[in-house]
Structures are given as structure tokens and as C-alpha cells.
Image: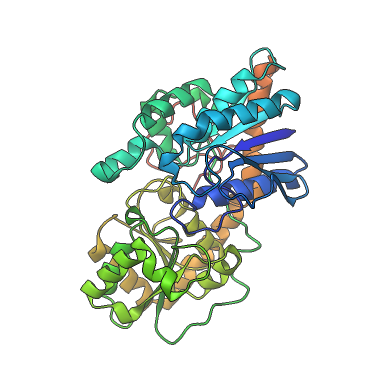
């Protein structure tokens, strides 16, 4: 199968931890690799943000990244990319008319706009190319949690509604997203839950461990924007004497003092640490190379992930895969992956006091933390390996293509029942791989 993935701002080749480089970049890269390993031809289309970047980058056999000229070849914040989407769509249309993919998979709402526009114009098929969409985050949720601080372009929610109504299938990454999509008007019969995954070979309990001292260590990994909750972790640290916090995320490139000093998010967090009186116990690493993340996670007594909201949340899965205890906020997809009191602890978001209490309990009972880590590793191996996620995604592709061709819809991988509150009704939405 020839698969075209559109990821306009989130290049799978980007360094993780910058302002616009996070879980979506990882998802696109790892899903692409898993689909290629299964024998499919995958091309990821992303916007060129550097003149020195080659047009094509062969990541590995079967997986290629194509860089599209749409706007200036410099980094542009994703919320400012809308004017360049028509040029992106025209470039894809021109390429696909000569060599059409079998299916198109858009990642993020702007990619969905591009994918729908380009796929509908390809004249090699009467009704255009089939399109599957993963939003990764929804504007309605962002607006609800960030209010006036939401920098999304005007019209985002309307655009998401239009994309959800026009694509052949929407892939939600967690069960909560199904209900948000329903509010947008996405038909549940065309919504399937397929979670994100984790590389269970790279992220494993065995392997190198980052250097550390005798202090109990907390680790947080990811973007440092306000909604990710690192401020709350620093607030909790004030209640945890003798505990250190290592923060991975921030500006890409060498983590020089000048680079860290110039980053507005790190300046904000340093101020928070000074206010809390914990400056000497917080260490900022900047953006950590992907290959170094497992060793950093293994060095932690607990990995903390407490965003205000989170469409999925890959870091908790990666920590579980490394056999580490996880303390996370009970939001979004984290509620699917982290089982409270089994693989870690769930706490309310934006509550440093509750977070501190949970962390105090984990750090005071190393045996419990070890048990959380063992259970987390088992859960990841059973449900969240990228081969499993690729299998579920391919099942969606096969169903869509069969529906387009008027063929009987093939049976996909075994569906795993979701055992969250029985009062929640998923309607006829398919749920793959999210059971506890």
C-alpha cells in the first residue's frame, strides 16, 4: 500500500522538545516506521523550514520524508501557517496526480485541510483519494483550557468541523476525544480509537542510565509551554525537601547557558523556581536528543507528567516502558494509559498540593514505585507497541478502501473493550487497543 501522511508543521525529523515539536512528531515518525516495516511505502509530507533541507530524506527502507515549499523556508510558529496552506495543497495535488497514493492520512487540523483539498482534486480517481484524519489536539479543548491565552487562528474549530465531516474516517487517540469529536459533528460510525504507541526496544528497563546523585530524582520531559504543567511540578517541589527535578525540553540545539537564558519558557520556570525557593534543586537540560531520553527516564525515581489537558501523552507511556513509576494528571488520553494505583498515580491537574502528596507517597515507598514500573512495562508490551498500533491503523485504512470500492469491509484486529465507566457510551465508534 502507498500511504501519504501529511504533517504540515510537525516534521518527523525535528528535535523534540521545542515550542512546536512534541508528541505529534514522534507519532508520525514511529507510525511511519512501523507501517514501512510491515511492507508498505510511506511518504510523510511536511513544510520546508530550512533552505538547506533536502527535498527528500530517506529515513529507512519504505519511509521517506518530503519537504514542501509553502511559505518562507524558515521556522514559522504553527499558529501562523494558515496563509501557506493553499500552496502546500497545490504542491501535493501536482505530485499525487502523477503518482497517487492509495490513501492519505492527515495529522493535525491544518494537515487535514491540506489533505482534503489536495485529495479531492486528484483526477485519477472519480471521487478523489480516500482520507483518514488524526487531529492530535482539538481547538475546542484548547480554547476551553487556555481561554484568552489560546493563540489558535480564528476559524480553527470551524475548520476542524469541516475536516471531520469530509474525511472518510477520523482516528481518535483516546476515548475522551470521541466525545469531543461528536460535539464537532463527526459521525461516531466514522470514528475509530487507535492510541499512540511506544518503541518498546528503545524504551525498556534495561540500558544506559543518565548520571545522577544521591538525591531522589523526578524527571519531566516535553515542551515547556504553560499548559504542560511544569510550573505545577516546581510548585510541588517546594513541599518535597531534598528532591531534585530534571526538566528536559526547551530550545533545540546545544544547551548552552546563553540558549537557555534566552528561552522565554525557561525564564518563566526559573522565576517560578526562585519564587518557590527551589532553584538549587531544578536542572534544565534544554531539548534532549531522542536517543538520550530512555537513559534520562531510567534515572528517575518517578516521571511526572501533569498537563492541564492532553490529547494523548506519549511521555507517560515511554516512562512505563522503561519500568518507571508515573505520576500524571487525570486528563485526556492519560486516563486511558496510566491505571491509577496500578501503573502509577493520577492527580487533578493544576494542583501542586495534590501532586506533592502523590509524589511524597511514591518516593517514600520504593517497593511501590517498583511495582508500578513492572505493571507499566507489562501494560505497554501488551497494548502499545508500534507494531500493534500500525496493525490497528492498517485495519482502518483497509476498511476505508473497501468502503470506497464497494467491497465487504474486512474484519480488523481484535477490538479490546474499553473498561472505563460503564455509563459512558461510545455509540458505534470502534475502539482498538485501549482497554485497561
The residue that appears at 64% across and 25% down in the rendered structure is 93
- Which residue in the rendered view is the most extreme toward the bottom? 214
Total label count?
A: 0
* Looking at the image, residue 385 lies above or below residue 362: above
Which of the 4 image quarters holds residue 118? Answer: top right
- Coloration mode: rainbow
Residue 147 image-quadrant placement: top left
User: Which residue is most to the top?
Assistant: 126
Comparing 170 with 45, the one in front is 45
Position of the N terminus by quadrant? top right
From the viewer's side, name the closer residue of 66 and 105.
66
Residue 413 visible in rendering: no
Residue 22: image location, x then y, percent: 49, 53
Instruction: Residue 138: give x, y in percent of width and height.
Output: 40, 37
- Give the residue at x 78% y 49%: 61
3 shown above or below 229: above
x, y percent for residue 43: 69, 40
* Residue 321 screen position, x and y as percent: 56, 62
Residue beneath the point at 60% across and 27% down: 90
| Residue 261 appears in view | yes
> Is 136 rendered above or below residue 400?
below
Q: Is 420 above or below relative to 316?
A: above
The residue lying toward the viewer, choosing from 196 and 254, is 254
Amino acid at each position: 500500500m502507498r500511504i501519504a501522511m501529511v504533517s504540515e508543521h510537525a516534521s518527523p525529523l525535528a528535535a523534540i522538545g521545542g515550542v512546536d515539536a512534541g508528541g505529534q512528531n514522534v507519532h508520525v515518525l514511529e507510525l511511519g516506521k512501523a507501517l514501512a516495516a510491515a511492507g508498505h511505502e510511506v511518504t510523510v509530507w511536511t513544510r520546508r523550514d530550512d533552505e538547506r533541507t533536502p527535498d527528500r530524506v530517506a529515513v529507512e527502507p519504505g519511509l521517506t520524508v518530503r519537504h514542501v515549499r509553502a511559505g518562507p523556508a524558515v521556522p514559522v510558529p504553527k499558529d501562523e501557517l494558515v496563509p501557506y496552506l493553499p500552496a502546500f495543497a497545490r504542491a501535493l495535488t501536482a505530485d499525487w496526480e502523477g503518482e497517487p497514493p492509495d490513501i492519505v492520512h492527515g495529522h493535525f487540523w491544518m494537515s487535514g485541510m491540506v489533505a482534503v483539498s489536495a485529495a479531492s482534486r486528484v483526477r485519477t480517481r472519480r471521487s478523489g483519494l480516500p482520507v483518514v484524519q488524526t487531529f492530535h489536539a482539538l481547538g475546542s479543548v484548547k480554547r476551553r483550557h487556555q481561554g484568552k491565552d489560546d493563540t489558535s487562528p480564528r476559524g480553527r474549530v470551524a475548520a476542524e468541523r469541516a475536516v471531520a465531516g469530509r474525511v472518510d474516517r477520523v482516528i481518535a487517540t483516546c476515548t475522551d476525544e470521541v466525545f469531543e469529536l461528536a460535539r464537532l459533528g463527526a459521525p461516531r460510525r466514522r470514528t475509530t480509537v487507535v492510541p499512540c504507541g511506544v518503541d518498546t526496544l528503545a524504551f525498556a528497563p534495561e540500558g544506559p542510565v543518565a548520571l545522577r546523585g544521591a538525591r531522589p530524582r523526578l524527571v519531566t520531559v516535553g515542551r515547556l509551554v504553560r499548559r504542560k504543567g511544569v510550573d505545577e511540578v516546581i510548585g510541588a517541589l517546594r513541599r518535597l525537601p531534598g528532591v531534585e527535578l530534571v526538566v528536559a525540553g526547551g530550545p533545540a540545539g546545544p544547551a548552552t547557558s546563553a540558549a537557555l537564558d534566552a528561552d522565554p519558557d525557561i525564564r518563566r520556570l526559573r522565576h517560578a523556581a526562585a519564587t518557590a525557593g527551589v532553584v538549587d534543586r531544578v536542572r534544565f537540560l534544554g531539548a534532549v536528543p531522542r536517543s538520550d531520553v530512555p537513559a534520562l527516564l531510567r534515572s528517575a525515581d518517578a516521571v511526572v507528567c501533569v498537563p492541564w489537558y492532553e490529547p494523548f501523552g506519549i511521555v507517560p507511556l515511554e516512562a512505563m516502558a522503561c519500568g518507571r513509576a508515573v505520576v500524571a494528571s487525570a486528563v485526556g488520553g492519560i486516563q486511558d494509559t496510566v491505571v491509577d494505583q496500578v501503573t502509577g498515580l493520577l492527580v487533578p491537574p493544576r494542583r501542586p498540593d495534590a501532586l506533592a502528596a502523590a509524589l511524597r507517597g511514591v518516593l517514600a515507598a520504593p517497593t511501590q514505585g517498583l511495582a508500578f514500573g513492572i505493571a507499566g512495562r507489562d501494560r505497554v508490551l501488551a497494548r502499545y507497541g508500534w507494531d500493534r498500533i500500525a496493525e490497528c491503523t492498517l485495519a482502518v485504512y483497509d476498511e476505508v478502501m473497501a468502503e470506497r470500492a464497494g467491497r465487504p469491509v474486512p474484519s480488523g484486529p481484535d477490538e479490546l473493550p474499553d473498561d472505563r465507566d460503564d455509563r459512558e457510551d461510545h455509540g458505534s465508534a470502534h475502539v482498538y487497543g485501549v482497554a485497561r
